[in-house]
Image: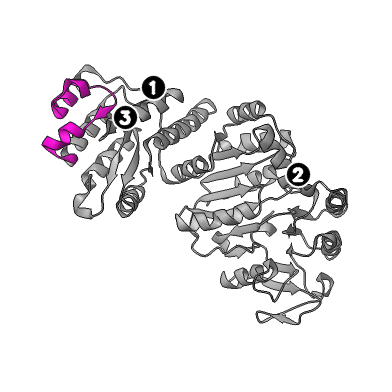
Amino acid sequence: MDFFFTPSSVAVIGASRNEKRPGHNVLKNLIDLKYKGKIYPINPNVDTLLDLQVYPSIKDVPEPVDLAVIITPTPLVPQMLRDCADQGVKGAVIITEGFAETGEAESIELQDELKKVCKETGIRVVGPGSMGIVNLQNNFTSSYVNFQGLNTTGNITFIAQSGIFTGGLVRYFATYDLPVSRIISLGNKIDVDDADVLNYIAKDPQTKVIAIYVEGINDGKQFIEAAKSITRKKPVVLLKGGTTPAGALAASSHTSSIAVNSDIFDAVAKQTGLVKVNTLSELFETARAFSLTPILPQGPRIAIITYSGCLGVLSSDTALKLGLQMATFTKETSEKIQEVVFDRRFGANPIDTYPATLKSGNENTFKTCLDLVLQDPNVDGCLLTVWGDETPEERTFSPNMRDIILHYQKQGKFTIVPVLGEKLGVERERKFFEDNGIVTTIFADHAIKLYNNLYRYAQFLKSNK
């Protein structure tokens, strides 16, 4: 499948002069990326586009073509695909929509015709209804979506069954600097499916974690085998759409997906080590956490240190609901914490530091409490809340606090840091910690979910050594 990600030549069938059309934007993206391969625009009504020679059809291209991107009206696509196969094109990305997902008999027949071409000729196909593939690691894209601002050295690969939704997420990735450098939009999955891509990405040394959104699975057995193989090498964070009757109906009309019972999917995730999540935000936060951290939580016993009683309550509730344990401190740790916070009520878990910070200051109080709980043999990991202040002078934590976290990371103690406060301060504090491989988020309850997701994967790895 290299030709989908690193083709030596690309034909854009349906290339357009109109700057608002996908057929124009695919060409422009390839040029802007400084793609090193050969580009062949295909359009019988145009001579040149963006200083490139245009060919009337794929049959007129004088040299072999690795990959074709098809963006023609729906009724023309089957013949375009067959022409590609006849010319020895190895693969095609079909961006055009309007096939089986419409539910109309004629459109279903057109999709069946595409499948027939694949079966008869052996040409590999992504789509139809694909947004394309983005591989910034190798300066290539078959997508029409603006990729400017994406992290070209990111270690996350994102796979999705959707098309335009994936395009919208590209802008999200760029805006929030999510380290995604490979994006694969599978569309209706008439040929290349999730299992194919998982097997391929498993061999990619630059991908540390995979985030995947699925609505349905074509071949359950192949998917399970692919998942079993890859999750022993790198984490796969999965969000399943269509988990309710209404959602399943929507998935069918969206990508012509066949629904998979949610209980069955949960069992598959547990069996194969997939980290199944429930929301888009959890999908990308979890993937980001895996991409950042050098270690995983090794146990369920978590300590919570917070400047707010409310955050302590909510975090504790979330932890217990997820099956984590609130760490029970040793007597020695509890007594020392009581000395720091000046109150016997706050020697237990969670630790509310606010009263003590009024007397001893934020940094001294938090630093001492963090050191105490991470020393405790009854603690596997810690949630440490940080206030994102507006100016560097008002920072809650110094580099010394970072050093404590990193010191105990080397001993297998995982710490996650939720940062709440003013926008600029939050961004600065999060960058400060993340640049040092310390996972952050904004809300404390989200932090607990991330801890749990990483811990579940660590458990899977332990049980499958």
Does any portion of residue 223 appear in the rendered image?
A: no
Q: Quadrant of residue 275?
A: top right
| Residue occupying image coordinates x 62% and y 69% | 30
Stretch in magenta = 334-362
Nearest-to-viewer mark from 1 and 2: 2
Q: What is the C-alpha distance between the residues marked 2 and 3?
A: 45 Å
Residue to which mark 1 is pinned: 325
| Residue occupying image coordinates x 56% and y 45% | 210
Quick one: 359 or 404, which is closer to the camera? 359
| Residue occupying image coordinates x 84% and y 63% | 76
Residue 424: image location, x then y, percent: 32, 55
Is residue 378 left or right of 162 when viewed as pictured? left
Quick one: 279 or 127, which is closer to the camera? 279
Residue to which mark 2 is pinned: 256
| Precedes in sequence: disc 2 or disc 3 | 2
| Precedes in sequence: disc 1 or disc 3 | 3
| Precedes in sequence: disc 1 or disc 2 | 2
Pointer 2 local density, CA inside 10 Å: few below 14, some 14–19, many at least 20: many
Residue 75: image location, x then y, percent: 85, 60
Mainly helix, strand or loop, the magenta region?
helix
Q: Quadrant of residue 24?
A: bottom right
Q: Specify the amino acid type for callout 2.
A: Ser
Question: Which disc, if any, is residue 312?
Answer: 3
Does any portion of residue 443 appear in the rendered image?
A: yes
Q: Specify the amino acid type for callout 3.
A: Gly
Is residue 266 left or right of 248 when viewed as pictured? left
The local secondary structure at tag 1 comes to: strand
Residue 2: image location, x then y, percent: 67, 56
Residues under numbered marks 1 and 2 in contact, where contact means CB atoms less than 8 Å apart: no
Q: Is residue 218 magenta?
A: no
The local secondary structure at tag 3 comes to: helix
